[in-house]
Amino acid sequence: MNKKEIRAAFRKAVFDRDKHRCVMCGKSSKEVKLNAHHIIDRHDLANGGYVPENGITLCDFDGGCHWKAEHWHATGEAIPDYSPHDLFVKIGSDLDKAMEASYDLEESLGEKIIKRLEEGVEGLKKGELKKTSIWRYNDES
């Protein structure tokens, strides 16, 4: 799965779990644009934290719930009810669950690389593959 597919799967899983409604104010995707917000910054978790345990559906407009949640990322200070802890509680998750799920995703990607290498070695033995097809990993494939 490439990054674009991982992001799409993350958004779909978060939106589906939250029934396409902002978890904080209840607005639906028919009323406002929604955002699959990373509770913990995607740079701080393995594989970008693209797991439902680290995602929450928030309405996305100026001054909306996504803006309120992002305030913590920008300043280190949370608007009341919008701290990472508060957001995790709303979805029945926590930092430990998000970290574990992110590492599980990492293992899945590692397993994919190993499988591709094993397939490539078998292909080389059979003369089916070129050397470059197994020695270069491309996350777009």
Image (spheres, rainbow, N blue to C red):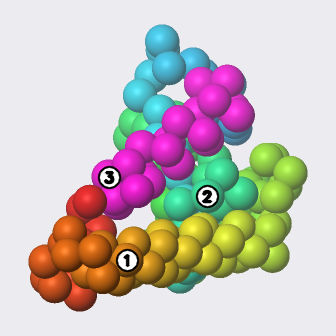
Could you tell me residue 55's position as x and y percent?
A: 62, 53
The answer to whether residue 77 is seen in the rendering is no
**In this view, 83 is above or below 106:** above
- The residue that mark 3 highlights is 4
Give the CA distance from mark 1 to mark 3.
Answer: 29 Å
Q: Residues within 10 Å of mark 2 (few under 14, many from 20)?
A: many
**Do the residues bearing badges 1 and 3 touch, measured as CB atoms within 8 Å?**
no
Q: Is disc 3 placed on a helix, strand or loop? A: helix
Q: Nearer the viewer, residue 87 or 129?
A: 129
**In this view, 139 is above or below 25:** below
Q: Mark number for residue 122?
A: 1
Among the two numbered marks 2 and 3 on one chain, the one whose residue lies closer to the N terminus: 3
**In this view, 70 is above or below 25:** below
Quadrant showing the N terminus: bottom left
Q: Nearer the viewer, residue 134 or 5?
A: 134
- Magenta span has 16? yes
Q: Nearer the viewer, residue 138 or 44?
A: 138
Q: Amino acid at mark 3?
A: Lys
Q: Residues within 10 Å of mark 3 (few under 14, many from 20)?
A: few
Give the CA distance from mark 2 to mark 1.
Answer: 33 Å
Q: Nearer the viewer, residue 119 or 87?
A: 119
Could you tell me residue 103's position as x and y percent?
A: 65, 77
Among the two numbered marks 2 and 1 on one chain, the one whose residue lies closer to the N terminus: 2
- The residue that mark 2 highlights is 51
